[in-house]
Amino acid sequence: MKPKTSILIVTVAIGILLNSCIVKSLQPFYIKKHLSFNKALLGNWVDNKKGQWTVEAISAKMEADKKSDAKFSDEDLKIYETYNKGYYITHLKKNKEAGFIAMPFKVNDTYFLDFIPIDIEDNEINSLAAKHLLKTHSVAKLNIKANKAVSLTWLNEERITTLFEEQKIRLKHEKIGFENDLLITASSEELYEFLKRALDMDMFTTLKKDGEKWNSSDKLILTKINAKP
């Protein structure tokens, strides 16, 4: 589970998955006591935008690497210790591959995934630019369906920005860079409590208050490959 590159930035990696802006945070959206692994997510998937997914348990991947006599640095072992209850996700689309650690957790009875990019193949990013990139987190609501499909819905940045402007939510955040991107700076505990309110306010639904749809590219539908009917 060695990174192919030190480039760690959610806006680049999630951009491979989605076409729109999603909410990014400096801190994880989960707290450890609410981590909840679900075997139903393991396996090979294809999404509604022709992306291919491989979802593995980090613990199983680490054990397989050990059996192959792979050498582990102190950094590798620290990553395993921190994320051993999570998934290692490989996403491939248009010959571009990205790897993510995804930590599964529950808010009440709803599953979420905290995404952290770890492997990015992009030869167009030069080394100086890479040194300016930040490691950030995103969160997706996970819905596991009975027909061997799952949906992943990310928080839409435009929608959350509107709620901040209308003073309907309070959460520590900054606007950064020349593009004035939203970056949440609250603690993990505050983010977890925020997700409770996000569910109550239906922030993960696809309709605006005026009835128009938010950008549908914030949602992906994954269908299991070779799933039995």
Image (spheres, grey):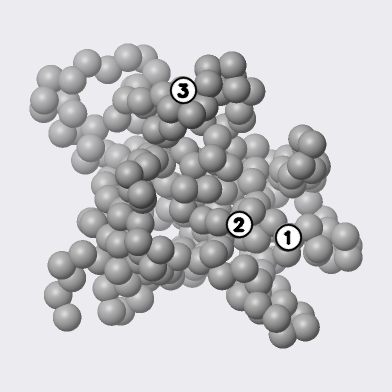
Residues at circles 2 and 3 in contact by the CB criterion of under 8 Å? no
Residue 80: horizontal and vertical position, in percent? 35, 30
Mark 3 and mark 1: Cα distance apart in space? 29 Å
The residue located at (23%, 37%) in the rendering is 61
Image quarter in which the C terminus is found = bottom left
The residue located at (62%, 68%) in the rendering is 215
Q: Earlier in the sequence, mark 1 or mark 2?
A: 2
- Vertical position of residue 15 compared to residue 165: above or below: above
SS at mark 3 in the image: loop
Mark 2 and mark 3: Cα distance apart in space? 24 Å
Query: In terms of image quadrants, where is residue 195?
Result: bottom right
The residue located at (29%, 30%) in the rendering is 1
Report which residue position mark 3 lands on: 6
Report which residue position mark 2 lands on: 20
Question: Within 10 angstroms of label 1, few (less than 14), some, or many (20 or more) residues?
Answer: some
**Residue 30 falls left or right of residue 57:** right
Of circles 1 and 2, which is in front?
Answer: 2
Q: Amino acid at mark 3?
A: Ser
Report which residue position mark 1 lands on: 158
Q: Is residue 123 visible?
A: yes
Q: Amino acid at mark 2?
A: Ser
Residues at circles 1 and 2 in contact by the CB criterion of under 8 Å? yes
Residue 160: horizontal and vertical position, in percent? 74, 60
Q: Earlier in the sequence, mark 3 or mark 1?
A: 3
Q: Amino acid at mark 1?
A: Glu
Residue 39: horizontal and vertical position, in percent? 27, 58
- Which residue, as the protein is rendered here, is positioned at the far bottom? 211
